[in-house]
Image (cartoon, helix red, strand yellow):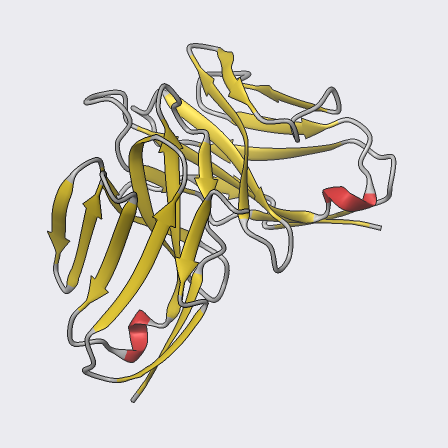
């Protein structure tokens, strides 16, 4: 089965530093998403991206966050100035364009630790 | 109050038992997802439902839109089914903006 790949699997950074989390969605998918899960808490939606622009974002996705699809295959999440509370597992996901919103395919996640 | 509630929070079963996990939600939705989160953290989509019932192998998912309730059933449970099962709802008009439940941690003993 096709896979969504995320790199790195673990990222440790100092508070205030910029981080970029990378994702390669499934090649014929058109909808891309970022979610996060703080340890011990439920998964939360951050942002959805379609046709090279953000289609929806949550309250969590403030000006410190940005997303980009720089080259037609990668999908990145940038956090400009990390805070301690940004420590979480970040999941990228993609879905197919046909039939509306169908099955989501998740990457294995990037564990971000902000020190 | 959480918009998506799952029960039970934790469930321990013996291998071979029939398992039911419940999900209730309080908002209007266009679809409901059942997800499986493995101990390593990875998430796999099991079902997306907007009405009725779906079956895949030993897994069955049902939804009652009027009652705002969904169930995930596992027949002939196996230790490899041990995972956290998460219900997530998509509000009408939304795409990937899902509201997630807290999950049900299932442990199946041999």
Rendered position, A12 above or below B32: below
B76 relative to A108 in the view: left or right: left
Rendered position, B110 above or below A6: below
A82 relative to A73 in the view: left or right: right
Residue occupying the far bottom of the picture? B110
Residue B54, position as x, y percentages in the image: 13, 48
> Residue placed at 24% from the left, 78% from the top?
B78
Residue B25, position as x, y percentages in the image: 38, 44
Which is nearer the eye, B97 or A30? B97
Rendered position, B40 above or below A100: below
Q: Quadrant of the N terminus of chain A?
A: top left
> Residue placed at 80% from the left, 36% from the top?
A82
Query: Does residue A9 appear in this view?
Result: yes
Residue A3, position as x, y percentages in the image: 35, 42
> Residue placed at 26% from the left, 32% from the top?
A102
User: Residue B21 occupies which quadrant of the picture?
Assistant: bottom left
Which is nearer the eye, A29 or A45? A45
The total of numbered circles placed on residues is: 0
Residue B43, position as x, y percentages in the image: 41, 51
Query: Does residue B37 appear in this view?
Result: no
A113 relative to B48 in the view: left or right: right
């Amino acid at each position: 089965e096709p896979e969504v790949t995320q790199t790195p699997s673990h990222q440790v950074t100092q508070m205030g530093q910029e981080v970029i989390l990378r994702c390669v969605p499934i090649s014929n998918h058109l909808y891309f998403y970022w979610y996060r899960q703080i340890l011990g808490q439920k998964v939360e939606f951050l942002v959805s991206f379609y046709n090279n622009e953000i289609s929806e974002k949550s309250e969590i996705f403030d000006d410190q966050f940005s997303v980009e699809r720089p080259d037609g295959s990668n999908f990145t999440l940038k956090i400009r100035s990390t805070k301690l509370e940004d420590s979480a597992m970040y999941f990228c996901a993609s879905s197919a364009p046909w039939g509306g919103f169908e099955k989501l395919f998740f990457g294995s996640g990037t564990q971000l630790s902000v020190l | 109050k959480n918009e998506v509630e799952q029960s039970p929070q934790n469930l321990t079963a013996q291998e071979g038992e029939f398992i039911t996990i419940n999900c209730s939600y309080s908002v209007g939705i266009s679809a409901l997802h059942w997800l499986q989160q493995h101990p390593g953290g990875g998430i796999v989509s099991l079902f997306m439902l907007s009405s009725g019932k779906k079956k895949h192998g030993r897994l069955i998912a049902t939804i009652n839109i009027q009652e705002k309730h969904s169930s995930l059933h596992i027949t002939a449970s196996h230790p490899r089914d041990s995972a956290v099962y998460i219900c997530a709802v998509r509000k009408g008009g939304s795409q990937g903006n899902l509201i997630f439940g807290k999950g049900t941690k299932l442990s199946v003993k041999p």
